[in-house]
Image (cartoon, helix red, strand yellow):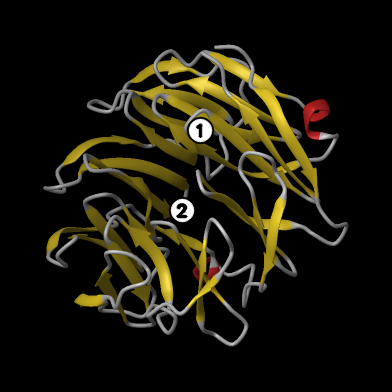
Amino acid sequence: MRAPRKRWLRKLDGRDHVQHFLAHPLGLVAATNHRTILLDPDTGEKRCDLPALASWYNVLAQPLIVREVLLQRLANDDLGAFDLATGERLDSSLRHLACSLVAPGLLVTIFDVFLQAYRIADARRTPELAWTFEYPTNSVQEVTASSTHVIVPFQHEVAVLDHDGAVCWSAENERRGGGTLVCDVADEDLVLLARNGRGGRDLEARDADSGRVRWRREEPLVACALTPGGVVVTFEGETRVLDRATGETRAWFSGARALPRRSAVARDVVHHLTPGEVVAHDTTSGRMLWRIGAGELGRAAPRALAVTPGRVHVAGNRFVACFEEGP
């Protein structure tokens, strides 16, 4: 695979520091510290400015895309709904919901001691309250969703629900010294749990439906990503590809620094940021496919990336860029 070709690079205002970045075939969304910018994905031209996020540093205030509609928490605490193609403000029935994350067909709202899930056909129709789940404690961690499950970590335990709200299974942190139990990432087959406690952070893979432990790696974990071909993990600065079924090391990433906590995965390619560049690796072999260096990014440090079919989008302080991937 050849290195991506730069399609466009758009400089932003000197005050713009991109905090959240979303890519969709209909539009790019760059939420900065003082406004949200909607860009044309083909040209990088600015379509319009949208109101700023209520709290751009809060994970629960991150913008979300439901079908072809952008949802974001506004300063008046309403949930603003905007057409992705035009930026037009929609009179959405979802505007009073405290949207926290989106799973396929579900809008999940997180409160202090419970969460609610609404079934949505699109963001223009009145949502149906599907179910409510109450926590036994108010110490809920960041909730994760896959195409089949919603994973709710709280204090020393995690509960895994299906999309109908039924608890499929739960797990406790049995690690010596206690600590929190969080879900780093999940798909329809695997749930990866990170156990924090004295001595570091290790990784456990469980069957998504039954909760059965598939394998466990008791090594200090930095970050991980799930791909169809394997589990990509960084243990103390060394990035490897693990077998999904056994957890055995299958390959090492060549020429790679540590994988960041958030990476963009497309098929069997993982795209990730290192200081000053963007790197793509094949998750079957660990081979580095290409690198986008600082020169291609205008000497600016990348802070976020997102992938759509055939394209890699990169955002940083005062810029957004688009690169096209080749065969």
In primary-sequence order, the first of circles 2 and 1 is 2
Q: What secondary structure is found at the residue carrying circle 1?
A: strand
Which residue does the image show at 63% across and 72% down from the upper left? 53
Residue furthest bottom in the image = 76
Rendered view: 28 above or below 53: above
Question: Could one spot residue 315 in this view of the protein?
Answer: yes
- Residue 180, by quadrant, is bottom left
Q: Are marks 2 and 1 in contact (CB under 8 Å)?
A: no
* 327 left or right of 52 in image: left
- SS for tag 2? loop
Query: Which residue is found at the position 36% from the left and 68% from the top?
Result: 155
Packing grade of label 2 (10 A; few <14, some 14-19, many >=20) is few
Q: For this view, does 260 lie left or right of residue 296? A: left
Q: Position of residue 158 (x, y in %)?
A: 27, 61
Q: Is residue 327 shown above or below 261?
A: above
Residue tagged 1? 234
* Location of mark 2 (residue): 198
What residue sits 50% from the left and 33% below the top?
A: 235
Mark 1 is surrounded, within 10 Å at the Cα level, by few (under 14), some (14 to 19) or many (20 or more) other residues, namely many
Measured Cα–Cα span from mark 2 to mark 1: 19 Å
Q: Check the image and name the residue furthest to the right.
A: 14
x, y percent for residue 251: 43, 15
Amino acid carrying label 1: it is Thr
Which mark is in front, 2 or 1? 1
Give the residue type that dot 2 points to.
Arg
Q: Is residue 136 above or below residue 206?
A: below
Residue 314 at x, y percent in the picture: 66, 40
Where, by quadrant of the figure, is residue 35 drawn? bottom right
Whether residue 221 is visible? no
Closest to the observer: 91 or 130?
Answer: 91
Given residues 294 and 80, the one toward you in this image is 80
**Mark number displayed over residue 225:** none
